[in-house]
Image: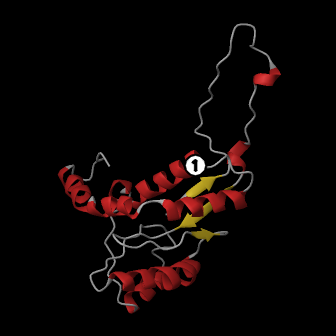
Amino acid sequence: MSPRFDLHHHDGRARVWRRQGERYNNGLVQERVAFGGGSIMVWGVFSFRHRTPLYHIVGNLTGQRYRDEIVAPLVLPALHQIGVQAVFQDDNATPHRARLVNNFIHQAGVTRMNWPACSPDFNPIEHLWDELDRRMRNNHPPPRNLQQLLQFLQIEWQAIPQAFCRKLVNSMRNRTAEGIAKRGGHTHY
């Protein structure tokens, strides 16, 4: 599934620090926008040596849009760049597993990794999304609007060192081994 980034980061916790006598001081109240003030969804692929540009998904992602806007123009060239040993790993999101997407991927000769349901522990891109969010929040002022949020995400996506991606790819053997050892239970990943 593609990650959703909120304009106003909110972790659901309320924090209050005040001195004696400041209890109802309106100048100390920080308002927040309900539901994060809007969000954007992005998509990207990475491998040991390569990374696609970050793609902004506008609106609902359907199987047809996933095939036409992501798989054909981004995934296939990335897989060809890797070579015949490339294996495509996505998840079981409905657009990813639509019949027309499955047929297209099969006709293109793509080897696709079988994906167990409900297994975020195995997907290293989840760690890449976390790193992207951390870098964006640490290296930029709070974005003023969704356009600026996307701009900051794109800057940080390109700035993530490829060594970080290599580390994630190299972790796959250990991720799967631990998942097998835990018999499908949670891993430390």
> Residue 48: x, y in percent?
33, 69
Q: Quadrant of residue 171?
A: bottom left
> Residue 95: x, y in percent?
52, 73
Residue found at x 46% / y 59%: 160
The structure's colour scheme is secondary structure
Judge from the rendering whether residue 16 lies leftward or rightward of residue 158; answer left or right: right
Q: In which quarter of the image is residue 78?
A: bottom left
Residue found at x 72% / y 43%: 34
> Residue 126: x, y in percent?
43, 56
Judge from the rendering whether residue 170 lies leftward or rightward of residue 132; answer left or right: left
Q: What element carries label 1?
A: helix
Which residue is the site of mark 1? 139
Nearest the viewer among 105 and 72 is 72
In the displayed structure, 54 sits above or below 152; it is: below
> Residue 143: x, y in percent?
69, 51
Kind of residue at disc 1: Asn
| Residue 126 visible in the snapshot | yes
- Residue at the top extreme? 20
* Number of other residues with Cα within 10 Å of mark 1, as a class: few under 14, some 14 to 19, many 20 or more: few
